[in-house]
Amino acid sequence: MKAPFSFINVCIFFSKRTLFDDFEKLRTANKADVYRKQRLQELGDLIQRRLEYLQNPTDCETAKKLFCSLTKSCGFACQMHHIVHCMISAYALGRTLVLKSDWSMYGAQSFETVFEPISRTCLVTPFKENITDWPAALEYMSRDNTIYLRSEENYSPQQPAFLPPAVPADMAQELSILHGNPSAWWIGQMFRFIFRLKPNLLEEVISRGEKAGFTNTIVGVHIRRTDKILTEAASHPVEEYMYHVKEYYDQVERTQPGISRRVYLATDEPEVLSEARKKYPTYTFINDFNSTRSATMTERNSRQSLHGVISDVYYLARCDYLVCTFSSNLCRIAYELMQTLHGDASGNFRSLDDNYYFHGHNAHGLTAVEAYRSNREGHIALKPGDVIYVAGNHWNGFSMGTNQRTSQKGLFPSYKVEDTVVAADMPIYPQVPL
Ligand code: GDP
C-alpha cells in the first residue's frame, strides 16, 4: 500500500531534523569547532594588527596613501561598504587609507563623529603633493605618494584581482578549511576595524540594548521596506521571515527543550512590529523603538537616525541567526560582522532574496562537482568541472545560472556546484608580529 503523502512529508521532515542534529554533532566532534573559532580569532587579530600598522605611519607626509572620498549619495550601510572597498584596496596596495566623509545628510559632520578615526597619524588633506586619480594612478603606483579612488566604479573596466571575493593569499588555504565563506569573513575583518564606535556612542548603544532586553539566544530579523521596495527589491510578508525563525527554533528545541523564542526585529517600517507581535504571540520581539521610529523615510536625515541604524547593525551582528534580505546592504553588514564574532557563522542566516555578494566584486564562477541532466523545462545540464556563473538562488534547492561551457542559462540543483576560494597576492606586512 502506498504511504499517504502527508505521512511521507512527516518522515522527510523528521529525517531532515535528524540530519541537522548529526551535522551539529560532526561539527563539534573532538572540539573541532573550538579550535576553528580560536584559530579564526588569531587570524582576525593578525589582520587587525596589520591594519593598525598600515593606518598609523610614523611620517604621514612621506607615506604612500590612498585617498577615498565618500561622494556616493546612498544610505549608511551602502556608504560603509564603500569604505570597506577603500580599506581592502589600501591593504592590498600597502597604502594608508585617508578618508574624507561628509555625513551632513545624517546630521553628523563626518565618519569620525561616530566612529574612531581610521588613522591617528594620517588625517584628512590638504596634502602638499599632487593627487593622481585612479585608474591613471596605476601607472604611477610606485612614484606617487597619494592616489585617489573616487568610487568602486573608478576601477572599471579593469578590476584589480584583489577585490572580493578574493582573500589574501597568505591565509587563503587555511581560511578555506576554517570558514564556510572566507570572503565574508575577510570583509567582516575590514568592518571590525572600521566599526569601532566612539566611547559615548558605544555606551549609548549598550544602554539601548539593555533597555530593549537583548540577550542570546536570539534570532535577528531585518525587514527592509519603504524606499527599497519601490525600486530595488520585493516586499516580503512577515510570515515569510517568521517561517525561517520557526524552523531555526524547532531545530534548537531538539537539544534545548523549552528555549524561549526571542527575535530582535530591526526595520524601517514601524507597523511591522505590532503586526509581528499580534500574529506570533508565543515569540518575544525585542526592538529598539527609537531606532525604528528614526529609520522611516521622513526621519532619516538626523543624527538620531544614524545612531539608530548603527545600533541595529550592532545587535543584528550579535544575534545567533539572521533572517533578512541580502539585497539590503544593512543585512549584509550584519552578516559580515557576525563572522568576526561567532567563529564560522557562514551558515547562520536565511536570505529571502539574493545570494551573498559584495557590490563591485569581481565576477566569479562556481564549479560543478556532479553531473546533472534533466528533461524539466528551464533546467540546464552540468558536467563535473563546468564553471557556472550564478544569477540567483531560488532557495528551494535550485539556483539559476549560466554554464560557461554550453552558454546555457537555466536552473540546476544548488548542491551540485561548489565555491572555490580565490586567493590574491597582497602584502604580508612582515613588520607586524605573527
Ligand atoms: P539598503 O538600502 O537596505 O541597501 O541599506 P542602506 O543603509 O544603504 O540604506 C537604508 C537606510 O534605511 C539606512 O541607512 C537607514 O537609514 C534606514 N534603515 C533601513 N532599515 C533599517 C533598520 O532596520 N533600522 C534602522 N535603524 N534603519 C534602517
Image: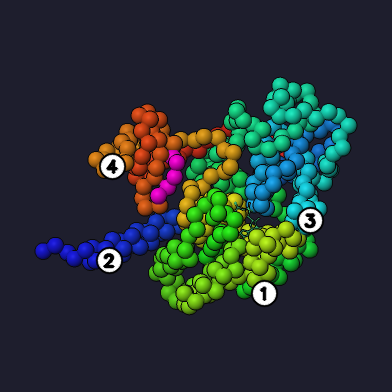
Q: Nearer the viewer, residue 395 or 299?
A: 299
The residue that appears at 57% across and 38% down in the rendered structure is 361
Q: Earlier in the sequence, mark 2 or mark 4?
A: 2
Asked if residue 75 lies left or right of residue 363, the reply is right
Quadrant including the C terminus: top right
- Residue 214 rendering spot, x and y as whole percentages: 61, 70
Q: Earlier in the sequence, mark 3 or mark 4?
A: 3
Numbered mark located on residue 362 in the image: none
Mark nearest the camera among 3 and 4 is: 4
Asked if residue 40 lies left or right of residue 125, the reply is left
Asked if residue 292 lies left or right of residue 382, the reply is right
- Judge whether residue 312 can be spotted in this image: yes
Alpha carbon separation for disc pair 1 and 2: 41 Å
* Label 4 with label 1: CB-CB less than 8 Å: no
The residue that appears at 67% across and 49% down in the rendered structure is 74
Q: Amino acid at mark 3?
A: Ala
Q: Which residue is mark 3?
A: 108
Mark nearest the camera among 2 and 4 is: 4
Alpha carbon separation for disc pair 2 and 4: 29 Å
- Residue 360 rendering spot, x and y as whole percentages: 59, 38
Q: Which residue is mark 2?
A: 10
Query: Callout 3 environment at 10 Å: few (<14), some (14 to 19), or many (20+)?
Result: some
Q: Which residue is mark 4?
A: 377
Alpha carbon separation for disc pair 3 and 1: 25 Å
Alpha carbon separation for disc pair 4 and 1: 53 Å
Q: Magenta-highlighted stretch: main secondary structure?
A: strand
> In the image, which residues are magenta?
390-394
Which secondary structure, mark 2?
helix
